[in-house]
Amino acid sequence: MTTIQFTATIKDGVIVIPQEYRNNLVEADSVTVTIQIAKKSKRKIPEIGLMAELARNPIQIKDF
């Protein structure tokens, strides 16, 4: 068994295999797929406390 690891894009729910690895699949009967989903990070705003209050109501400073 040969192991190949790469990062792929997804188009319409289909994993797009990079061109340089496609030839390895021509003679394969089957493959084992492991998926690690990379999520876009979203900054969370605290719900309570001073930072939460400032995030909801920013202080405007003249000429800053």
Image (cartoon, rainbow, N blue to C red):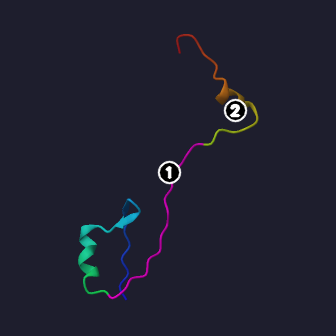
Circle 1 crowding by C-alpha within 10 Å: few under 14, some 14–19, many from 20 = few
Q: Main secondary structure of the magenta part?
A: loop
Q: Which mark is residue 4?
A: none
Q: Position of residue 2 (x, y in %)?
A: 35, 85
Q: How many marks?
A: 2
Q: Is residue 54 above or below residue 18?
A: above
Q: Position of residue 12 (x, y in %)?
A: 38, 59
Question: Pointers 1 and 2 in contact (CB under 8 A)?
Answer: no
**What's the amino acid at mark 1?**
Lys
Residue closest to the far top: 62
Answer with mark 1 or mark 2, whichever residue precedes in sequence: 1
Q: Which residue position is annotated with label 1?
A: 40
What residue is shown at x 37% (from left), y 86% (from top)?
30
What residue is shown at x 38% (from left), y 73% (from top)?
5
Q: Which residue position is annotated with label 2?
A: 51
Magenta region includes residue 39: yes
Q: CA distance from mark 1 to mark 2?
A: 23 Å
Boundaries of the magenta span: 29-43
What residue is shown at x 50% (from left), y 51% (from top)?
40
Q: Is residue 50 above or below residue 33?
A: above
